[in-house]
């Protein structure tokens, strides 16, 4: 067990090798938790959380350079923060945004999937599952304030939230582009997308690995609202107020009813899903595709 994170210097969390966050002897939150509600802000290496105690809304700024790609460490930080906020009765809403210029989240860290041992790949995938389960099943109102490009896992993170507000900047794009990397989005990525934009749009999007400009994303319902770039966070905050005005219990039960079957499907198949991922990603042909994609990213820069 190791303590990896301090939240507002008032609490620590236990991380076990076999799972991210559970701590059966201490409860999930261990050590001193007495003054959490008096603290507003916290930051770790790659995340800054501003929690406004009066509104009950936390803003999670992703600040993992250069592009907020989701490495195992970053996913672990995110999961710990989500757990922390979920347990904090004073936190009812979460806005997720980016502090990195031009990018909301570049998706899963490709380097975590390239040249790694099967054990490491399994650990990584478990953390991806964990993040999705926590966010999709959250009791909080969750809003993605998408202030930059959001491909693949970044799109997943966005559609896992309750509502999406995107910067109206045609240089940005969002979508599940996995096939372009020669890989296949797993069933729970697919189902989250179906739950957002319907079956037909999902089929086309996934098959062609489409990345949508903001206006196109809005037209298929992949995002809910476009706003000028400098207003993404303020509009997200206003929108949050409307969502929080709905009776909490009714809203939470409705959310759970809508998402339960998708969540249960992964929950009851986690090990098989990890094994599928490991078998798939460690194949020589898939490793070759990932290498070519990474080279393509580098060439684009040159
Ligand atoms: N992982 C790791 N490194 C990345 C990633 C990433 N996802 N994305 C970008 N980088 C790196 C780049 O290689 C570059 O590195 P360096 O500086 O060393 O050359 C650096 O970040 C900056 O990248 P750019 O110069 O490209 O930055 P831009 O601001 O021009 O563009 C973008 C930002 C739009 C995010 C662009 O970098 C991009 O398109 N990245 C690729 C995004 C992508 O395709 N991600 C897919 C990841 S796979 C995934 O999320 C789901 C996998 C599901 C697996 C299922 C298997 C069964």
Image (cartoon, rainbow, N blue to C red):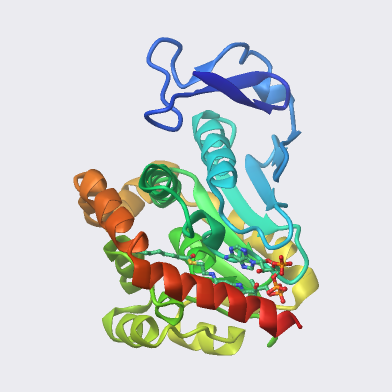
Q: Is residue 43 above or below residue 6?
A: below
Asked if residue 292 lies left or right of residue 250, the reply is right
Quadrant where the C terminus is found in the figure? bottom right
Who is closer to the viewer here, 59 or 81?
81
Whether 3 is drawn above or below 150: the answer is: above
Q: Please report the residue visible at 42 percent of the width from the left and 19 percent of the height from the top.
A: 23
- Say left or right for 10 vs 139: right
Q: Is residue 155 visible?
A: yes
Q: Residue at x 32, y 69 (%)?
A: 190
Q: Residue at x 58, y 37 (%)?
A: 81
Give x and y (percent) for residue 116. 46, 51
Q: Position of residue 268 (x, y in %)?
A: 19, 45
Res. 184 in view = no
Residue appearing at x 26%, y 46% in the figure: 270
Front in this rendered view, residue 35 or 2: 2
Q: Nearer the viewer, residue 125 or 26?
A: 125
* Quadrant assignment for ligand 1: bottom right
Residue 90 vs residue 42: left or right? left
Q: How many marks?
A: 0
Position of residue 84 relative to residue 196, above or below, is above
- Find residue 100 and report its image quarter: bottom right
Front in this rendered view, residue 14 or 226 = 14
Quadrant location of residue 147? bottom right
Residue 124 placed where, x, y %? 44, 47
Left or right relative to 22: residue 228: right
Residue 102: percent from left, percent from top: 74, 72
């Amino acid at each position: 067990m190791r303590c990896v994170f301090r939240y507002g210097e008032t609490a620590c969390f236990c991380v076990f090798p076999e799972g991210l966050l559970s701590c059966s002897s201490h409860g999930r939150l261990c050590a001193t938790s007495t003054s959490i509600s008096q603290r507003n802000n916290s930051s770790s290496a790659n995340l800054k959380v501003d929690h406004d105690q009066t509104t009950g809304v936390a803003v999670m700024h992703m600040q993992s350079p250069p592009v907020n790609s989701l490495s195992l460490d970053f996913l672990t930080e995110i999961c710990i923060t989500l757990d922390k906020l979920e347990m904090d009765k004073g936190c009812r809403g979460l806005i997720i945004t980016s502090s990195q210029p031009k990018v909301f989240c570049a998706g899963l860290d490709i380097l975590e999937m390239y040249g790694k041992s099967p054990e490491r790949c399994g650990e990584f995938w478990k953390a991806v599952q964990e993040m999705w389960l926590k966010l999709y099943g959250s009791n909080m109102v969750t809003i993605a304030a998408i202030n930059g490009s959001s491909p693949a896992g970044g799109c997943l993170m966005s559609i896992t939230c309750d509502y999406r507000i995107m910067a109206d900047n045609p240089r940005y794009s969002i979508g599940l582009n996995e096939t372009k990397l020669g890989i296949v989005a797993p069933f729970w990525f697919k189902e989250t997308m179906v739950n957002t934009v319907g079956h037909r749009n999902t089929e086309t999007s996934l098959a062609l690995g489409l990345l949508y400009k903001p206006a196109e994303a809005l037209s298929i319902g992949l995002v809910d609202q476009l706003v000028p770039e400098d207003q993404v966070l303020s509009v997200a905050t206003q929108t949050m107020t409307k969502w929080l005005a709905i009776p909490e219990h009714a809203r939470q039960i409705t959310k759970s009813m809508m998402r339960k079957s998708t969540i249960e499907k992964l929950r009851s198949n986690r090990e098989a899903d990890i094994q599928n991922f490991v078998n798939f990603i460690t194949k020589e042909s898939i490793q070759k595709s990932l290498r070519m994609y990474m080279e393509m990213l580098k060439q684009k820069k040159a």
